[in-house]
Amino acid sequence: MSIRVDNISKRFGKFQALEPLSLEIPDGELIGLLGPSGSGKTTLLRIIAGLETADSGNIYFHGEDVTRVHVRDRRVGFVFQHYALFRHMTVAQNIAFGLEVMPKARRPGAAEINKRVANLLEMVQLGHLASRYPAQLSGGQKQRVALARALAMQPQVLLLDEPFGALDAKVRKDLRRWLRNLHDELHFTSVFVTHDQEEALELSDKVVVMSAGRIEQVDSPQQLYAQPDSRFVLGFLGHINILEGRIKSARMQQGKAWIDLPEAVADLPEAQFYLRPHEVRLQTEPAAHAHLPLKVNAVSLIGAEVRVELEADGWSSPEPWEVGISHAQYNSWQPMRGDPCFAVPDVGHLFTPA
Ligand code: ATP
């Protein structure tokens, strides 16, 4: 089921929560709505669901205008951050609930309901917990029940609002992978809200980046990361290190810092370059093509990598720098707060957004 959002806008009192915006979601895609708190993600999701009415514009499902169709009749399934399971019902009863309360004319028979519940339990790998109550489940298990309950209605569109927001990092990661696999198997169209960049990039076919009620960019995760359209998108998808200065004879200079530029960018009078943490190396001596002195601010060990936070030394950068180094480099260098070092950007990655 494809979804078309056409010129939708929404105000709450004087506050413009959504500027008029449009979006095409092809059938069977998994779409992430990503943006900071208050950017309008949930409002857009609720309008697609029919839980909220828009001030202007239309919503189409598979080419059909559903703007004025009641939420009950839109065949959408929901999963929210807080599981909202019925506490007095078992896992199996929770999953069956939506089917049991359907109008008689559309309600499947008891045998069909049991069959569907059994299939869903298997699909979400909870068959062995069918007769447990929600209080006896972990957060990840509850969220899988919530998903099974939504899928029981055989929705054409599945909408998820921060579905894994309340779970710890490891469970989140497992559930993401699991949802992605389930989606690839069943091919429903889904839209999920998240403010977690990693989640959006890992899970989505396409990411819709939102800011202040507007859509900033819609692209595949790879495209967004490699070619952000704006400074906002660039900065929102992870840390960036900023290098700015005047350019003369193919050399950019600012204070004590300088770097020889590749031909492609050497003609500008001045520029600002953005480098991801993995596009910079740290050395205790400057390189031949770059002299960018930094001072270590903090060092943190995060799993496979060591993250070094730094500040410009003898020049200025609008934000602190962050560079990831390997454990091997950390062990041989042992950087401490206040230690001097030099950044060596991979000049192939010097990049200035349009
Ligand atoms: P979050 O990640 O914090 O959930 P969001 O991007 O989902 O944020 P929305 O929940 O869509 O943002 O809210 C967008 C803006 O609209 C916010 O500033 C919010 O305060 C405002 N808003 C949302 N619902 C209402 C409402 N019912 N009445 C008044 N203002 C609202």
Image: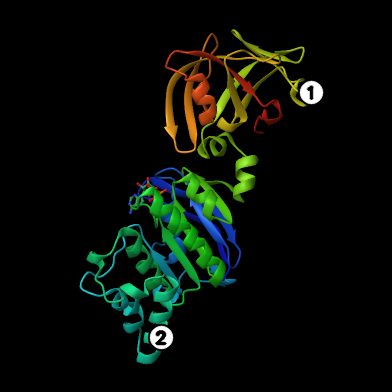
Amino acid carrying label 1: it is Glu
In the image, 241 versus 207, the foreground residue is 241
- Disc nearest the viewer among 2 and 1: 2
Looking at the image, residue 112 sits to the left or right of residue 32; the answer is left
Q: How is the image coloured?
A: rainbow
- Give the structural element (helix, strand or loop) at label 1: helix
Residue 343: quadrant of the picture: top right
Mark yes or no: residue 136 visible.
yes
Q: Position of residue 191 (x, y in %)?
A: 49, 60
Q: Which residue is mark 1?
A: 263
Q: Residue drawn 54% across and 57% down? A: 31
Compared with 325, 259 (above or below) is above
As drawn, the label of residue 158 is: none
Q: Position of residue 16 (x, y in %)?
A: 42, 47
What residue lies at 37% left-to-right and 86% top-to-bottom?
114
Is 202 above or below relative to 132? Answer: above
Which residue lies at the image location 32% right of the left edge and 83% below the top edge? 100
| Front-lying residue, 214 or 186 | 186
